[in-house]
Image (spheres, rainbow, N blue to C red):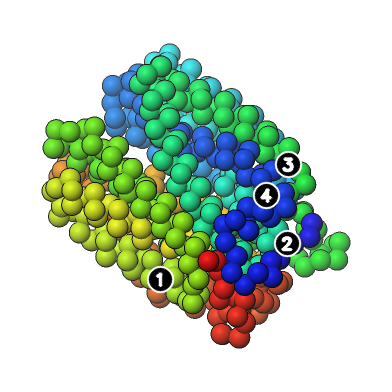
């Protein structure tokens, strides 16, 4: 597959979306990734309805998240080795069957252990469509300044998904049937996943190993910079999970549970707006500097959450926290292009996505326990702790996030030159 490299020094979203073949994977990809945001809330609402326990519902949902975090990188590795279609086709079928089994067991009042058994394959088989879309952008834009714009666009798409998905699942569960959210999730996964898999022309080429004359295949996790990013992305997951639980607990404490949706929507909107801005600014600083600044701002914003007892102040802080997530998230995904060979990028993206999911699952559990024992304010300590640890890791090991030599072809060369100030193209992003 040939790369599409732009020569326009100031590319923007319009030019990105005019990339040949982009819409053929963007539209089905959006449908296929929507269920990812519906799964957790769909499980919580159904299991809480059938068991009467938020604790049991949260535990089953957390098991799904941990399972996804552990198995997602293996899915990415297989996609890099055998092609995305080869992984997606069986994956969406297994996921649809697993969600259906979990739904039936919950409605049949099966014991909790049976729900956990069904939750494991449900999480393990979640199609990693987001990382696959990012890998398709990377294959088409290898070495192009449009890659930064693509990273911002994908962040905005993710956030839009996490705004729409939970609302849709909640509306279906409360207005139609407690199982309707999971049923819709399974249907969208099957339909969107099969349509996305059908787009064979835009999937990244499968690169053969040294026996066929190319460089030996490497695991994304063997690259030090990827391991650093995995640890730091756990911090982002702690923000998502901690905010979701703590905002819910706060809303219940003040006797106005309906305000939870508004508060979380403001938080998500901040992330989405910042993502749009990140793709519309001409950056003079490299992605590593932006990641460090993003995490520093995120830690500072999260440090005041536990002390707030006003809806207005919490909304303002939530907006600020959301605004700080996008630079950290987008910068991390942008660094992957310069750190990881094309043959392992899907795996690398799934490691980061899995880290967010694992951080979220851990934060949901810990924040819930702290909120139950000490009130909602205690739950807000989890985002602070997670981002602070991520920031310390990032600053301490930042040297590992600098590309060492030309390991990724054109992308590695451009990133290396950008780090040393030798190539104007590496510092140009969008208008």
Q: Which residue is mark 3?
A: 199
Would residue 367 be visible to someone looking at this image?
Answer: yes
Q: Which residue is mark 1?
A: 292
* In this rendering, the label closer to the viewer, 1 or 4: 4
Q: Quadrant of residue 260?
A: top left
* Residue neighbourhood size for the residue with mark 3, other residues' Cα within 10 Å, grouped as few (<14), some (14–19), many (≥20): some
C-alpha span from label 2 to label 4: 11 Å
28, above or below 206, in the image: above
Q: Which numbered disc, 2 or 3, marks the residue that appears first in the sequence?
A: 2
User: Residue at image x 54%, y 52%?
Assistant: 154
Q: Which numbered disc, 2 or 1, marks the residue that appears first in the sequence?
A: 2
Q: Quadrant of the N terminus?
A: bottom right
* In this rendering, the label closer to the viewer, 2 or 3: 2
Residue 162 percent across, percent down from the top left: 43, 42
Residue 209 percent across, percent down from the top left: 79, 61
Q: What mark, if any, has residue 22 been given in the picture?
A: 4
Extreme residue in the top direction: 108
C-alpha span from label 2 to label 3: 18 Å
Residue 284 percent across, percent down from the top left: 49, 77
Q: What mark, if any, has residue 4 been given in the picture?
A: 2
User: Residue at image x 41%, y 58%?
Assistant: 274
């Amino acid at each position: 597959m040939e790369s599409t490299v732009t020569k326009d020094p100031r590319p923007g979203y319009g030019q990105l979306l005019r990339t040949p073949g982009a819409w053929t994977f963007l539209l089905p990809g959006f449908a296929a990734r929507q269920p990812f945001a519906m799964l957790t809330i769909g499980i919580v609402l159904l299991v809480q309805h059938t068991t009467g326990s938020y604790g049991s519902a949260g535990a089953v949902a957390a098991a799904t998240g941990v399972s996804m975090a552990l198995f997602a990188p293996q899915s990415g590795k297989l996609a890099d080795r055998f092609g995305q279609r080869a992984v997606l086709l069986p994956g969406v079928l297994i996921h649809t069957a697993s969600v259906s089994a979990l739904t039936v067991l919950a409605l049949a009042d099966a014991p909790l252990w049976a729900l956990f058994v069904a939750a494991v394959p449900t999480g393990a088989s979640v199609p990693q469509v987001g990382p696959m879309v990012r890998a398709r952008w990377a294959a088409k834009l290898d070495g192009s300044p449009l890659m930064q714009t693509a990273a911002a666009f994908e962040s905005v798409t993710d956030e839009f998904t996490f705004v729409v998905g939970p609302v849709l699942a909640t509306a279906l569960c409360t207005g139609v049937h407690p199982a309707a959210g999971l049923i819709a999730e399974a249907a969208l996964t099957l339909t969107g996943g099969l349509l996305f898999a059908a787009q064979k022309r835009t999937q990244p080429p499968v690169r053969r190993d040294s026996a066929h004359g190319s460089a030996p295949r490497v695991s994304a996790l063997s690259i030090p910079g990827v391991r650093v990013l995995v640890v730091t992305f756990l911090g982002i997951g702690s923000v998502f999970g901690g905010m979701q639980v703590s905002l819910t607990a706060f809303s219940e404490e003040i006797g106005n549970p309906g305000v939870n949706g508004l508060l979380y929507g403001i938080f998500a909107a901040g992330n989405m707006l910042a993502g749009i801005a990140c793709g519309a600014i001409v950056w003079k600083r490299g992605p590593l500097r932006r990641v460090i600044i993003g995490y520093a701002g995120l830690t500072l914003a999260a440090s005041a959450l536990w002390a707030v007892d006003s809806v207005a102040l919490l909304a303002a802080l939530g907006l600020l926290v959301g605004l700080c997530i996008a630079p950290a998230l987008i910068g991390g995904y942008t660094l992957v292009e310069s750190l990881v060979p094309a043959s392992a990028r899907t795996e690398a993206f799934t490691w980061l996505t899995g880290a967010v999911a694992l951080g979220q699952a851990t934060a949901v559990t810990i924040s819930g326990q702290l909120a139950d024992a000490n009130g909602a304010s205690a739950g807000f300590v989890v985002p602070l702790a997670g981002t602070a640890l991520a920031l310390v890791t990032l600053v301490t090991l930042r040297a590992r996030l600098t590309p060492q030599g030309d390991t990724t072809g054109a992308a590695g060369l451009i990133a290396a030159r950008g780090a040393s100030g030798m190539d104007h193209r590496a510092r140009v992003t969008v208008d």
